[in-house]
Image: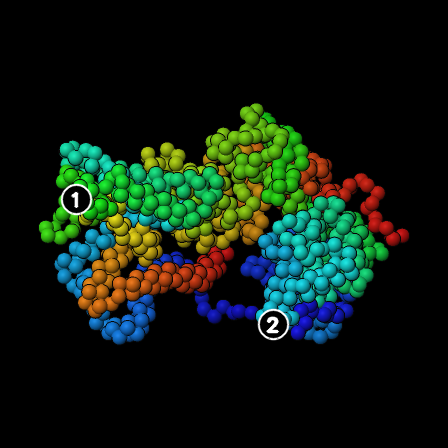
Amino acid sequence: MNSAVERVHISHVEMKEIVKTFPGVMACNHIDFDIRSGEVHSLLGENGAGKSTLMKMLYGMLRPDGGEILLDGRRAVFHSPADAISAGIGMIHQHFMLVPTMTVAQNVALGQPSSRGFMLDLDVVSDKIRKLSAEYGLRVNPDDLVSYLSVGEQQRVEIIKALYLGASIIILDEPTAVLTPQEVDDLFVVLRNLVAEGHGLVFISHKLHEVTTLSTRVSVLRDGHFMGTRDASCLDRDELVRMMVGRELKEITPRGYSGGAERLKVRDLHVQGDRGTEVVCGVTIDLHAGEILGIAGVAGNGQRELAEALIGVRVPTSGTILLEDADITTAKLNNRINAGMAMIPEERMQDGAIKDFSVQENVFLHDHSDPEFSAGIFLRFKKMEAHARRLIQDFKVKTPNLDTPIRNLSGGNIQKVIMARELSRKPSVLIASQPTRGVDIGASEYIRERLLLQRDNGTAVLLISEDLDELFSLSDRIAVMYEGRIMGLFNREDTDVQTLGFLMAGLDPKGESLVGPGCE
Amino acid sequence: MKEKRQKPQDPNQLLSRDSWFELGLRTLFPFLGVLVALLVSAVVLLFLRVNPLAAYAAMFRGAFGSMSGWYQTFVKATPLLLVGLGICIAFKASVINIGGEGQIIMGALAGTAVALRFPDAPAFMLVTTCLLAGFLAGAFWGFIPGYLKARFKVNEILSTIMMNHIALQFMNYLLSGPMMDPEARSAGTFLAQTARLPAGSWLTRIVPQTLMHSGVYIALTLAILVYVFLWRTTIGFRIRAVGLNPQASLYSAINVPVNQALSMTLAGGLAGLAGIIEVLGVHRRIIEGFTGGYGFTGIVAALLGSLHPIGLIPASILFGGLLVGANTMQRAMQVPAALIQAILGLVVLFVSGSTLGIQQIIKKRRISVTAAIKEDQS
């Protein structure tokens, strides 16, 4: 028995007419994609464009509803990642699948049959790792404990693991999202070595400059549709951005926006993320009464942490937040709510609602101790019920009754309940994070209407969204966030999708790098 | 591609049927667990050449076959119910309290100290003060691991187990030292027990010639109060919110650590109350081993009662019955005492196993029902 799997040689993987539907969404709508050995084929697209879904089907994590996968012309069906792995396909996930308390060699050997039957063969595994490491310039020591490794090093362990399992085609799901710029350079060296050795790489990203420096070919997905493939020799960044964000803009009807009183003043805010690195780097914004300020940006550029710092569930490392000239930088969440702040959190089911609580209980997550709804420690159910019923009707929430556990409602209706709860306090500042993500069209429309209504009633609204259409149709001003910084702030009328798209991809819209090298 | 063959049913109807189904499952399954445990134990009994049917008959007769059996069952059910109520509150905040034994001990010690210190106080005042002292001491013993969890994220399972050992050794020290019965000392027997408590501190025996005492009423009243507390008060609301989703609670400005510590404190208080009630009602002094494992058995009773204060009432009666019946079985059938422990252990195993089974079934059903409702909404 051989402990390390010999490399499985595949020279051409094709995905044809791939269809995948999830309840309510067509994640992949007849997509064609192929990858050859010795090339980097990048998949470009906004969040939710279907990149990850497509690749999960290639890796056997999801099964396509239609279409076929061909390996060197032969049809293949993957029931699980194990099938894909034995066919020579590997995947490096965004979140690493490593056991931190084990060494590199133990992690690689995990789940693999030993060459010595019941006895461990870690020395054999280690030798193989050293060999692979030297061959591809991965600089991985098999005896290191994974918990002591940096993020970049852990990623290289994942690559070793894929190679050890004999992968010929390797899918990298946004591999640079978690890396520092220096680590990105190191990774690219490794990836080039892999290509030189005849591996085929699928590189998922939405950072344009990375894609253009690395790729042999680039394919663009948008809203589950295949938008086209371009050769590296003829890359037009302008065109790629258009393919990515695409749609021509609906005509904008200017609204009478005359910046109201300043409500929220954020000055040079720095916030750390979960990994302890700085993810919001000196953000300064002003939010006025009666405006919607949109924050555009690809997920993971610090928007989430910014919102959390503003509402008070994450402590900023420095900078100040002023609410109507009162310093609330370190104020407790409860005090912020009482001072008029409200939030629609990004993770609806995790942060916004308690799924096993009833609709009514979810309405009262914060207000249950309000004197209107409780006498001493006792809840006043009659008042609570009347209030909840009013909100449900007002926001047109479809629910069998108030006692229905909220998990039984659709995403859109859950979001409406959350919104009803937050707006019922008549907030002076509302922070809405991705309020329509994963929400069906009807509910999305309604939620947008309510946001506009709130704006017209004088609330200062901060709208964080990845949906440019939504930002354009709702915002008075739009700021773009990229890698923790505000890249630009525009009046809606003075900007366009193109400009924002460039800023979101980390590019200067006025720079001369609009046309890639190699194009005449 | 799945085709819709039938018209979706009225989701309202589906839903209510669903919740009835769930309720039925939750109530029935634990008892099924008891049944399976008895079946497995039957095999063990057969190995010992004991007729399992006769053994179980003896068990049932002992627990429920006579009025005195019933009274004994109620006496055993009382501490189980009190401890279980505490477990229930802690569980709602998703805190697991394994410290019942220690809290029982601390409650009993504090109440006993009060009773021995003020032997001549008026009866009503003395009983009330003893009960209060028992509650507070147990609450304090629950507060410590609760605070450690809230402040330093110390795992409450480990800390409560350690608190049990501390309480036990503290009691052993007191019983063989400062609190030892002076009579035992002068008689030279040196029994590890306290002096007999003054009559003014005793809980009334409500049925003469039995151990049945008024603590039963206290336990039943508290079961209702705990129900009201959890579902009708703001504090109960917050405790449940914290237990179901700490993340969302945080976003709604509910203080997660404080509520977790509070639930642990209340759990400790109820166990402490169980301890002092057991002393004032049954033994009327602290004797070695008076806790009878109620701190642990109470956890299982709580699981059997689906972690619901009202469901706990029949569950603790059943468990009380098992304890009483096991004694009868031991005497009547010459079954070794260790086997009784094994049978109770099996009951624990299967009851907790059955809750997992329920979750599986409910999950499956929920998916289909939810799908039907969502279809209807869109």
The kind of residue tagged 1 is: Ala
Q: What residue type is labelled 2?
A: Gly
Q: Quadrant of the N terminus of chain B?
A: bottom right
Q: Name the residue under label 2.
A: A117
Q: Can residue B84 be seen in this view?
A: no
Q: How crowded is mark 1: few (under 14 residues within 10 Å), some or many (20 or more)?
A: few
Q: Closer to the camera, B298 or A257?
A: B298
Q: Is residue A421 left or right of residue B111?
A: right
Residue A309 vs B329, above or below: the answer is: above
Measured along the vertical axis of the image, is residue A153 above or below residue A511? below
| Residue B254: x %, y % from top left | 44, 39
Judging from the image, mark 1 belongs to the subunit labelled B
Q: Identify which residue, A378 or B197, lies in the foreground.
A: B197
Position in image of residue B24 (x %, y %): 33, 61
Q: Residue at x 70, y 58 (%)?
A: A159
- Callouts 1 and 2 close, C-beta under 8 Å: no
Q: Nearer the viewer, residue B239 or A450?
A: B239
- Which residue position holds label 1? B187
| Residue mark closest to the camera, 1 vs 2 | 1
